[in-house]
Image: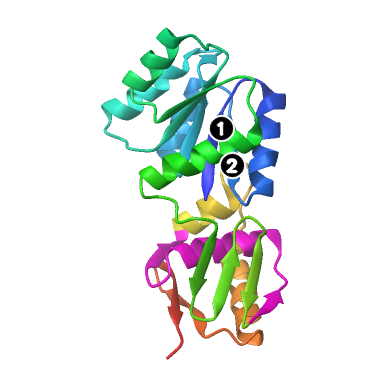
Amino acid sequence: MRILIVEDDLELAVAIGSAFGRRGVASDHASTNEDATLMVDAMQYAAVILDLGLPDGEGLDLLGRLRAQRNPIPVLITTARGDVRHRIQGLEDGADDYLVKPFDFDELFARLQAVLRRKGAFQGSRVAFGNLRFDALSRELVIDDKAVTLSAREIELIDLLLRRAGRVVSRQLVEDQLFGMSEALNSNAVEVYIHRLRRKLEQAGADAAIETVRGVGYLLRLAA
């Protein structure tokens, strides 16, 4: 899962990203309405954490554009404006939740989970498929009760594939979730991580396998 943090306070944005990263949630950062608009158009995010006071306008401007385009992406507003009038305005404009600064990162994460559950986009921290068991909070993959050592990118990849087990995951979505907007991407980077993860699953005795669907993406399926 990857979210977009729209926040002009770089220190706070980094802190939110780090806190979410420790909980298995990847993130990208935009500091302006313009950058956020470009990133939402280019990427598939699970949710947006949106500050209201941005250098080039109101965060509500971005929210309004999203809702005018009938984009249902969950939006959680974070702002120092705590009076009832501003909270009501944000919710009426289409926000899914509203959290006043300063806030606790645990509460922010809990509210994000609640929003995603309401939208049907969050399946909880634990996922199982065949003899694979994955916990997004501990970032641990277990196969037949034995922990499998994975790199950070491999953890993001198995999380993505497990949550869509039995369905094809497009290559573009894999790129978005693993690398986001902030990193240069080698042409074979995705294939490298798919190959490494596929090999580790095989070596651990997984009864699920990663299948490449040529020209489309990847599919985690139970071995025949």
Q: Residue 203: tell me if it is visible.
A: yes
Of pointers 2 and 1, the one earlier in the residue sequence = 1
As drawn, 109 above or below 86: below
Magenta residue span: 145-171
Residue 5 marker: 1
As drawn, 173 above or below 8: below
Figure quadrant of residue 202: bottom right
Q: Residue at x 55, y 57 (%)?
A: 125
As drawn, 2 above or below 30: below
Residue 27 marker: 2
- What amino acid is at disc 2? Ser
Q: Residue at x 50, y 71 (%)?
A: 128
Callout 1: helix, strand or loop? Answer: strand
**CB-based contact (under 8 Å), mark 2 and mark 1:** yes
- What amino acid is at disc 1? Ile
**Is 38 one of the magenta-colored residues?**
no
Q: Position of residue 99 (x, y in %)?
A: 52, 24
Q: CA distance from mark 2 to mark 1?
A: 7 Å
Q: Residue at x 49, y 66 (%)?
A: 161
Viewer-nearest residue: 147 or 45: 147
Figure quadrant of residue 110: top right
Viewer-nearest residue: 182 or 207: 207
